[in-house]
Amino acid sequence: MRYPENFITELVERSDIVDVVSGYVRLGKKSGSNMFGLCPFHSEKTPSFSVSPDKQIYHCFGCGKGGGVINFIMEIENLSFPEAVEFLARRAGMPVPEEENDAESRKRARMLALNRDAARFFYEQLSSPGGQAARDYMAKRRIGPVTAKNFGLGFAPDSWDSLRKAMRAKGYTDFEMADAGLLRKRENTGFYDTFRNRLMFPVIDVRGNVIGFSGRILGDGEPKYMNSPETLVFNKSRNLFALNLAKKSKCGYIILSEGNIDVVSLHQAGFDSAVASLGTSLTPEQARLLSRYTDQVIIAYDNDGAGQKAAQRAIGILEKLDVKVKVLRMSGAKDPDEFIRLRGADAFRNLLDASENQVDYRLKSVTDKYDLAVDEQKVAFLKEATDLVARLPNGMERQVYAMRVADLAGVARDAVSGEVERRRRRMIRSAQKTTEREQTRPERLIQPDGRALRYEDAASAAAEEGVIRLLSIDASLAKNVPLPDPEDFSAPALGKIYRIIRGRVERGESVDANLLGQDLSADELSLLVRIQQKPEILSRGEQALRDYIKKIEERKDARQQGTDLLALQQKLKETKGYRG
């Protein structure tokens, strides 16, 4: 739907971008009037995410994302434009104009309603006579009824169409259920239930919506766990099981485990900050999601080789964010669920208190690989350990761990400290050279950050950006300068942005980025903000606009000539006797 501009303008005025962004990003460092923080959309250690209170926009100089407050909510909460408007309107206490949402929003709302009704169906089946197998399994795993209710656990009957029949009775179609991942289609004989004879774990997002399901099989068969497929509302790499509960915890940290049962057991034992990834290793998107709710994560993965490998990977992702990472080491149990059943909650709490910081954990993992009594292995240990320590950002931390490495290997502390700093200088020089190479490539400088938006003609695109930038800054420049047609632009994305801005300029309307979210995609709006952020000398704005337009026309003529030559070449190829 299209909202009235006066409504959008008022909504933006009542949704200060600094206040909204501060709910997700710790803004601190200031440069001029702008505030900076770590970008919530990509992993970084140096703040490059800028928020302008004056312009009411954000822009990341690292990943290129940008826009206004509505666009920010769309990106951070994974919402459509109408849903982001409703989100901010609720926050501001504003009524939303009474009109129907667009087709995608209606479909999204319908799918969420279907998931909610399916979750209720599974929950009811758990207490039915047919749910005895699921109740027996829960008793075996010591999952009590209160915990089952808190998580909304349910049972998918061992039937081909029990859910299908129940949802059809509520008015949902087979195709709607298939789109939500609740049904699968046979080749020629219709649809059947995706989840059968499974203990069901609804996946609930931080807003309380049921977005998908995870089912644990109760008998023999594979896979042991089954998750909903990717849908309009469910993306497993961007969500975490039980984060809707863990975000309310007052303990100050989040426990990251591998499985749903581990999470349920931890919550039942009083550890209400446990979450798990959804059938995947921790992803950068999940790590950034965690960083919105905590600055400390304790990794409690399974006590086996795969769990240790997954922990190392998770550390590598989390350490790129402003998050402290600790790792829990278990002995005598393969996972948190088994440990709690065997040793109890107090013993697990002691494990949490004794959890190692990620550097200790990784250094011990390196140490365990080598026999330090053998000179050859000692040298290999020193190479790997000094490389690990050299990557630590804090100088004092590097010094402390360099001394520990030296003591472990039985060599001089000065030698190890010197080697650590030499390796760090090499790493910095290598990173600087890589950055310089990227920054000195003209094509890289002009190309937009969104992968879907590419420039085929860099020279023309630079001029096209200039036209957009000047019209955004000072629309009056267009009064005395004949503007080009959008079709003259070489880059489709720039042509679209220019067409919208030119139309608004001609109608005397504002070109505020917050008002363009209804017409531009997230990538296109980020591109516009990036263009607007580049410097431009307005004292000669009219002449600069003419120069940009002249370059666009020249490049258009050059492209047309190239097209004509290709057409001539093709014609010659089709002529008898021609040899290309």
Image (cartoon, rainbow, N blue to C red):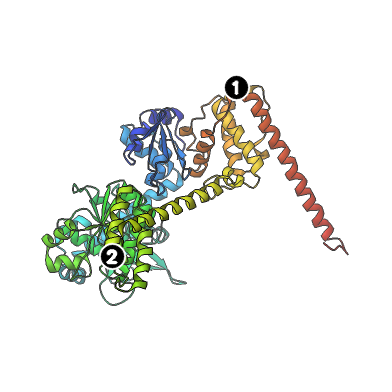
The percent coordinates of residue 420 (x first, y second) are 37, 56
Label annotation for residue 428: none
User: Which residue appears at 35% of the width and 64% of the height?
Assistant: 382
User: Which residue appears at 43% of the width and 39% of the height?
Assistant: 71
Q: Is residue 71 or residue 424 the one in the foreground?
A: 424
Is residue 557 depicted above or below 133 in this figure?
Answer: above
The percent coordinates of residue 369 (x first, y second) are 32, 70
Q: Is label 1 in a helix, a strand or a loop? A: helix
- The quarter of the rendered structure image containing the C terminus is bottom right
The percent coordinates of residue 573 (x first, y second) are 82, 60
Q: Is residue 192 left or right of residue 479?
A: left
The image quarter in which residue 85 lies: top left
The amino acid type found where label 2 is placed reads Gly
Q: How many marks?
A: 2
The image quarter in which residue 198 lies: bottom left
Is residue 478 depicted above or below 205 in this figure?
Answer: above
Q: Is residue 419 or residue 269 the one in the foreground?
A: 419
Residue at the far bottom: name it.
220
Residue at the far right: name it.
577
Distance from Cα at disc 1 to Cα at disc 2: 68 Å
The percent coordinates of residue 83 (x first, y second) are 39, 42
User: Which residue appears at 15% of the width and 68% of the height?
Assistant: 139
User: Residue at label 2?
Assistant: 410
Q: Is residue 271 left or right of residue 311?
A: left
Label annotation for residue 539: 1
Instruction: Examine the rendering and report whether any part of residue 134 can be seen.
Output: yes
The image quarter in which residue 160 lies: bottom left
The amino acid type found where label 1 is placed reads Ser
Instruction: Examine the rendering and report whether any part of residue 234 can be seen.
Output: no
Is residue 318 depicted above or below 382 in this figure?
Answer: above
1 or 2: mark nearer the eye: 2
Label 2 CA crowd tier, 10 Å (few <14, some 14–19, many 20+)? few
